[in-house]
Every structure is written in structure tokens, then in C-alpha cells.
Amino acid sequence: MRLNKEKIAKWISQRFADDYFKFYLVSHCAEIEVESYQQEDAELTVVYNYWDDGQYASDCQDYFLFDIKVASNYGVNFPKVFQLIRCTDKYGWSTSEDCLALSENLIDLEEVDVEVEIYHWGDPEVEQFIEHYVSNLDLEKEDFAEMLIEAYDAKNGLPSFVPGCLVPHFEKIVAEYS
């Protein structure tokens, strides 16, 4: 049995999904991407990244595009920034077979390093998953459209603070629910 980036990414994603505090990351943001890994005997060191929209910081205006008091009245928030989280973790098992199988018999986990890079709408790095992110608003689109229309008069145009790259997506949402 051999390891590969896809298998490791799926395993890390499942670990996040099983973690109460990390579940949101894999259910709402982009997928985990394994940049590199090194396996030596029963140890596996993995460098991976994922995008985070900061929704956990729901009381901090700096993370959100729309006024958080207004947005909370509609039960929606939309991020102003995204964070690319890059992690280096070291996992340990008692045997190399357990390591190769990515078994649940982990005996050691060390978070070696975490780097956070902040990106804004319009940055080329974020452009790659705008469609993915906006399409995951399915459960909130009606409330989001209602906020845009009622609080920001979006039928007559979007507020000037909305980044240009988001305008077509927001206009489409407003049109669908007007």
C-alpha cells in the first residue's frame, strides 16, 4: 500500500469532519490540499493548506464585507477576507503498516507549524474559488438576497464597497430572488 497526496488529503479532511471545532472548515470552505509529505517508518510529516473564510470570528467587523449587525438580522455573513492556512503536521503510529494505512491507531500528533496568509477579493489566489464559495451559499441565498435588497437597495445597484469580482455573482442572486 502506498501513500499519495489525494489519499492523505482525504484522510485529513475526514479527521477535520470528525472534529467539532474543525468541521466547519471542510463543510464550507475549499478542500484540503496536500502540498508535500514525507513518510519515514511509522512517521508521516505532511504540509497541507486550506482556505478559511473567518466565519468563526462572527463578532469582528474586519472579517466581513457587510455590516455585521445588519447581516446578523438576516442570519447571513459574507467574508471580506480569506485566509490561506498552511500547516505542517507530524503524525506517528506504532508501525509503518499503520502509517501506510493511515489507521486510526495514531499514537502521536504534533502540529509543527501554522502559517496564515490574508487575501482579499480580487486577489488572483482567491479568484480560483469564487464560484465554489458562492455556490456553497445554497442554504443562505434567499436570506442573503433579502438582505441585499432590503438593507442595501440592491435592485437599484449594489453598494460601491462590493468588490467588482463579486458583482456578477451578487447580481445573479438578487435577480433570482426578486
Image (spheres, rainbow, N blue to C red):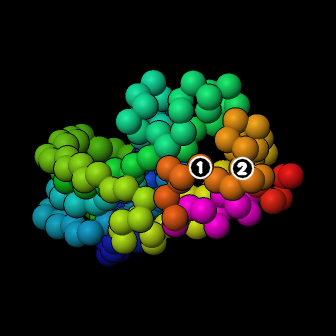
Give the x, y percent position of residue 7. Answer: 41, 68
In the foreground, 84 or 69: 69
At x 47%, y 39%, the residue is 64
The quarter of the displayed image where residue 44 is located: bottom left
22, above or below 28, in the image: above
SS at mark 1?
loop
Q: Nearer the viewer, residue 7 or 178?
A: 178
Would you say the residues marked 2 and 1 are in contact, meaning their CB atoms lie under 8 Å apart?
yes
Return the residue at label 1.
Answer: 159
The answer to whether 143 is drawn above or below residue 60 in the figure is below
Residue 154's disc is 2
The span shown in magenta is 165-173
Question: Seen in the image, is 157 located left or right of residue 2?
Answer: right
Q: Is residue 172 magenta?
A: yes
Secondary structure mainly formed by the magenta segment: helix
- Residue 10 forms part of the magenta stretch: no
